[in-house]
Amino acid sequence: MPRQDGWWETIKYIIVEALKGSRRYYLAAAGLLLLTIYGLYLWIFIQHAPVFLGTDYGGLILTGMNDSVVWGLYISFFVFWVGVAAAGIAFSIAAYVFNHPEFKKIAVLGEVQAISALTIVLMLIVVDLGRPIRALFEMPLLPNLRSMLDWDFIVITTYLLINLVGALVTIHYYRRDKALPKKFLVPFMVIAAPFAIGIHTVTAFISQALTARPIWNSPLLAPRYVATAFAAGPAILLIALYLAERYIEGFSVSIEVYKKTLYLVAGATIVGLYFTLSEAHEIFWYTTEPVKWAQAKELFYGPHLPYLAVLTWLWIGLGVAAVILALIPSTHNSKGAIAFISLLVVVAVIAEKTLTIVIPAYEPSTLGEIRPYHPTPIEYGITLGVHALGLLIYLLLAKPAIKAIMTHYFKPGAHHH
Amino acid sequence: MSVGPRREGSGNGSPKVDESRRNLLKAMAVGAGAAALTSVAAVDKEKFKKALRKVSIEDLLGVPADVEAGSTLEMRAKKKEKELKEWCRKEAEKICQERGDASEDCKLARQKCDLITVKATPAKKGVRYAMALDVNKCIGCRRCVYACVMENNQARNLGIEWIRVLELDRMEFQDLLGSEWYYGNEAPKKENVYVPIACMHCENPPCVMVCPVKATWKEPDGIVVVDYDVCIGCRYCATACPYGARRFNWAKPYVPVQELNPNMHILGNVPRQVHVMEKCTWCIQRTRDGGVPACVEACPVGARVFGDLNDPNSPIRRIAEEYGLFVLKPEAGTKPRFFYFFGPSRTPPREEAKSEGKEVKENA
Ligand code: SF4
Ligand code: SF4
């Protein structure tokens, strides 16, 4: 039956499966949709009203940003989600490189996670841009290849495309109970792997070479980005798996997957903490660069921005706690405990990779001004909306993906593990 | 002077253009003058017109770089001029309706609208602008800031000021940490030094490097400009600039039309749109026509010097030779073309002035 096998059928399958579901599923999706619409409303009709509607009121002036602190909450979360996206495909790469069947089974969820994370990433840029429509036309028309922003845009969109292809192909084969062909997998991994590392590296390169912002001038910035990405990304995947097992009947994953992933998460957290230590040493022991020193003080002690210090120490505290818990044998054997440790790591990395990365570079500013940045309600609202959209996409894609996985791996009667 | 053969050339109406254009013009002027003197009645008008060619201001000022008339930029400037005039007239009518046709504001607004010109004057060949500021002279009065706001049609509602004057401790001044921006009216204070900062028009500008859409670039005469019609408002340049020189229009900028400066340059002081970046352009609308920036003109103590680095007779070269030029934050590695220097006559701080010279004057 060629009709049944077609790509078009797969797309239809995804749509149909995404729209089917329990009452709870509908409620969750509707809630997310509402939040998304609310965020969209805030963005179009209030924050960007002068651009879209030509009004006199509104504008980015409604955010907490100003000429001293030009990037804020949006770019902070942008950095975090780039990391989560990067870790998405790394997951499936590991699965195929080590040829582990249980990992293979859930690899497509890594791709779905990357797709939703990248949606958040792109939307956060869009809401932050002063003139997004102009950008749409001019980025391709007038590229400046010396600008890291262009490279970031190129790698992020390419990586998104790669993940879309990956997810589509996987669902295409699994839904018909077929294994993924080697012919596809090998070139796919070879292309995807450098991009996974690439998106986060290039994102770090946006900031790391700017002499104007001493605290970013560290060659450790990109490696630290990648390290904590490999902590938070797989941790989020573990939490998602845990929830999927609870809420989707008949779906189960071996504890081996949890354990092995936890080792990766813990290892990456250790490396991330180690980088923080190394950077702290460079700053607090010997630096003679007064601005870097002043910015580091805001980061670790927060004299003007207490929340920066809270977040920094939260990262260190929760990071250390998670590592210790992960090393205790008794926690290894419970999925619940592993999911809890993962949650700790996610919170820790959010603390490490959002405001604490971006804001200290502007406090004090290049002219020595300290103008404490506090996000305004509109920034929170829009950020929330963007996240709701990402989560909604995750929900809509994970559903058919899991269904396809189950078709291929969970044959009725014969349980897989 | 080799005007002899030229005179013949201008006589028969077909001069051979083999030397530089400037020489030719000079020669023609001299030749025509001589002809007019010797035979006032003999020359008939048509022949005279053939012999003389009209000299445009542009010809006198120098040869345009690579932008000829009819360039895209010029066309855009013309279009913008039309749009601005329309917008201005509408705004003016509003004012006139509100305050009456006879009101000062109404008259002024209408007048401004008629005067609006948007230029696209290109860079002159061989010119490399630079500015210097005498730290010993600056009294922190911020007059340059106000002059700049008015000259460059900066938004009055957003507090955009291209120039920041930092008040720093005279004894401890090492870096800009702890600088005071809002120091009130007591300046100059004895224990402080005042450091005005605006775009440094860096030789190696990071703002240009990072812009994802090439909305900002360095012109051949050294002025770093922003194209307000291209900027996408990503603010990466503001993050990259080590001198905090870039200003963003965080909301819709507002400039009352009766306060508009109608002498505009498309890459300079044309009224901006919401969510685009702007910064000092060394008053491109003035300097490319041979003037000096508004801040130089406004400074009451003459602390600012502007000129062409390539011209050995320019004031900036004299300063360089006599006092030496210093740059702020050399470690940023951007090679600023805005310099500081330490001039000779120190303006005495207020208190000393009172105890010394001023009393004498008051008694006299
Ligand atoms: S001072 Fe800043 S805005 Fe001006 S040229 Fe240098 S980097 Fe660019
Ligand atoms: S804000 Fe405008 S000028 Fe600055 S980097 Fe972005 S697009 Fe370029």
Image (cartoon, helix red, strand yellow):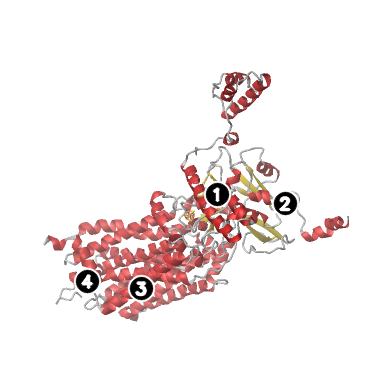
Q: Nearer the viewer, mark 4 or mark 2?
A: 2
Asked if badges 1 and 4 are on one and the same chain, I answer no
Task: Name the element at disc 2.
Answer: loop
Distance CA(mark 1)–CA(mark 2): 26 Å
Number of residues whose C-alpha sits closer than 10 Å to that of mark 4, classed few (under 14), some (14–19) or many (20 or more):
many
Q: Position of residue A241 (x, y in %)?
A: 29, 74
- Assess disc 3: are there few (<14), some (14-19) or many (≥20) residues with their C-alpha within 10 Å of its C-alpha: some
Q: Nearer the viewer, mark 2 or mark 3?
A: 3
Q: Which mark is residue A403?
A: 4
Please name which of the two marks, 1 or 4, marks the residue nearer to the observer.
Answer: 1
Residue type, numbered disc 4: Lys
Residue A62, given in percent of the width and then of the height, sits at 50, 67
Where is mark 3, residue-wise? A34
Residue A220 seen by the camera: no
Tag 4 subunit? A
Q: For mark 2, name the chain.
A: B
